[in-house]
Image (cartoon, rainbow, N blue to C red):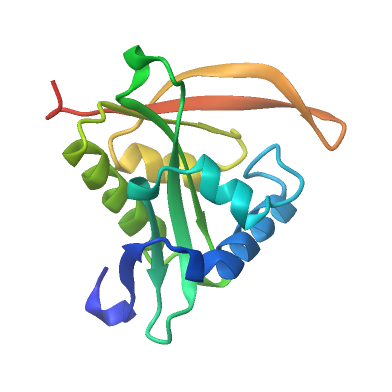
Amino acid sequence: MSGALSAVVVPLAAEHADQVLAIYQAGIDEGNATFETNAPSWEAFDAAKLPEHRFAVLDESGAVLGWVAASRVSDRCAYTGVVEHSVYVHPAARGRGIASALLKALIDSAEQAGIWTIQSGIFPENAASLTLHQCHGFRIIGTRERIGRHHGVWRDVVLVERRSSTVV
């Protein structure tokens, strides 16, 4: 992170739980981030996310401004190098490079761990997220049309992935 922002990327830990889940719920409430309708409990979130591939950005007071976390896509050994991720930024902290710093931290940790593919599904209406991901080397690989209902409305999901150029 830029020193001008007085923010730092740190490993996401249990002490960040309440703020992380509040940011998650804010994204859910906006309607273009996920099919979820409520943030999970910390226990469920913690169990689903890979501890070595989750980060938070904290401001100078220690408040969480955003987070990124990755999950396995499968327990099958063929997919050990593939993860799915989510990135969320507090609504009041958007436009400051936080999501970019979080994606960079995730990409760096994934490559150091031998992960060759990071993927995600993004609602097409979430243009900011699609642009952010493309700026970090993600490419659109397709659209799952009418893949699920969200508040009674059929929604499409754009599939994006980033393939490592260093993990072979």
Residue 41 at what x, y percent from top left? 67, 54
Point 61% across, 68% down: residue: 18
Residue 9 falls left or right of residue 146? left
Whether residue 90 is visible, yes or no, is no
Residue 30 in sight here: yes
Instruction: Say above or below: 108 vs 80.
Output: below
Q: Quadrant of residue 139?
A: top left
In this view, the residue in front, 103 or 133, is 103
153 and 61: which is toward the camera: 61
**Residue 22, relative to residue 114: is it above or below?**
below
Where is residue 8, by image quadrant?
A: bottom left
Whether 155 is drawn above or below 144: the answer is below
| Furthest-bottom residue in this view | 61
Quadrant of residue 134 within the rendered picture: top left
Question: What is the tally of numbered marks visible in this picture?
Answer: 0
Residue at 53 percent of width and 44 percent of height: 47
Instruction: Report the residue at 25% width, 26% height from top.
Output: 116
Residue nearest the observer in this picture, 106 or 100:
106
Looking at the figure, which quarter contains the C terminus?
top left
Q: Position of residue 29 (x, y in %)?
A: 74, 55
The N terminus lies in quadrant: bottom left
Outermost residue, right side: 152
In screen coordinates, is 4 left or right of 131?
left
Give the left or right position of residue 10, taking residue 146 as reference.
Answer: left
Q: Residue 154: image x %, image y %?
A: 78, 25
Query: Which sits in the foreground, 150 or 51?
Result: 51
**Residue at image coords 43%, 28%:** 160
Q: Position of residue 118 (x, y in %)?
A: 35, 31
